[in-house]
Amino acid sequence: MSFHDTSNTGLGLGLGLGLVSFHDQSENCMKSTNDPLREIHKIKKVENPSKCNSTCPSLTLGPPDDDDDDDDEVNNQPPSSKTESYEYFRPHVSSPSAVSSFSNYSSIKRERDQVLWEKEFEVEVEKVPTRVGDVDEDGNPRKKLRLTKEQAAVLEENFREHSTLNPKQKQELAMKLNLRARQVEVWFQNRRARTKLKQTESDCELLKKCCDTLTEENKKLQKELQELKSIQATPMPLYMQIPAATLCICPSCERICGGNNNSDGGNNNNGSSHTTSLLIGSKTHHHSFYKSNKYPFPHSSSAAC
DNA sequence: GTCCAAGATCCTTTTACGTCA
DNA sequence: TGTGACGTAAAAGGATCTTGG
């Protein structure tokens, strides 16, 4: 239902009903059993690092990354050595100072994953940040990065195609942008949240407009009702209650009388038709009174002046 | 077939950093 | 130069679903 439809009903029925459809469809989809994400999930299960072979380490677990995401120059450099490749894929390890700076950094689960990863790959993990971009002048780790315009543009482009990613797409995108899969995932999450927020805001605006329109219309109807009530309550001369088109002036008495009305089937006191009762020159005449369902005046069907 | 734990992703909320007026 | 508002990356926490034992 469009806004127009809603605003023109005068009753406002359906307000909000149609608006429901404005909400993010993908979101609704996600909740359904036949959710495409479930398909995605299946794929993910296949690619689950903890379940698959050793060439597939976890990409999504690990502490916040300070190694490869906050320096754009470095960030856009693909891993060049085996060590860097491991570094690129491994769960994250930062300096102790970095650890202390993140309140939730010591997630048990992620630490465990980190340990498992180290064991599995027998990699000597570095305990200090490896790049200048990881720390500020005071040696404090930086917590977040700013994505480059190019990265944001590519992510945006992908988001337009599909608001969710399967693991393969995520991985490819991460590789392409030289980001971690986790970063891509987070970006998509935030992007979905932004989309939903905007949608909610626009829905809210729409509802406001609908509400204003209906309020205005309600006022008009109330006013009209009030007028009709006052008309009905005020007694007025008979001729004022009779539509002008049905009125005529009696040629003999020169008084206004109602027009002819045959709704009574032509029955009157003398049995003659009202159509001839107002003929000029007629000595005796009958005034025809307007009778209708709308104005049921309690007069007899004919009367002498 | 049912139950349960593990794992993955989602969403919402919160936190904290970067940018800009 | 300092500051507050705003945008946004990142994480926490809870919910839901699938899978394997």
Image: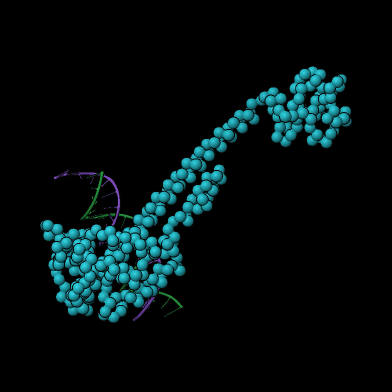
Chain colours: A cyan, B green, C purple
The location of residue A58, given as percent across then percent down, is: 27, 73
Q: Nearer the viewer, residue A265 or A170?
A: A170
Residue A238 picture quarter: top right
Q: Is residue A298 visible?
A: no
Answer above or below: position of A276 versus A253. below
Q: Residue sitting at 38 percent across and 71 percent down?
A: A41
Q: Residue sitting at 55 percent across and 43 percent down?
A: A10
Answer above or below: position of A181 versus A235. below
The location of residue A303, given as percent across then percent down, is: 81, 24
The location of residue C4, given as percent across then percent down, is: 24, 44
The location of residue A70, given as percent across then percent down, is: 21, 61
Residue A103 picture quarter: bottom left
Q: Nearer the viewer, residue A251 or A16?
A: A251
Q: Residue sitting at 14 percent across and 67 percent down?
A: A130
Give the left or right position of residue A136, taking residue A236 as reference: left
Q: Residue sitting at 21 percent across and 68 percent down?
A: A77
Q: Nearer the viewer, residue A293 or A174?
A: A174
Quadrant that contains the C terminus of chain A:
top right
Total marks in image: 0
Give the left or right position of residue A37, taking residue A265 as reference: left
Give the left or right position of residue A113, taking residue A289 as reference: left
Residue projecting furthest to the left: A138
Residue projecting furthest to the top: A253
Answer above or below: position of A179 versus A45. above
Residue projecting furthest to the right: A271
Q: Is residue A279 visible?
A: yes
Give the left or right position of residue A283, taking residue A34 as reference: right
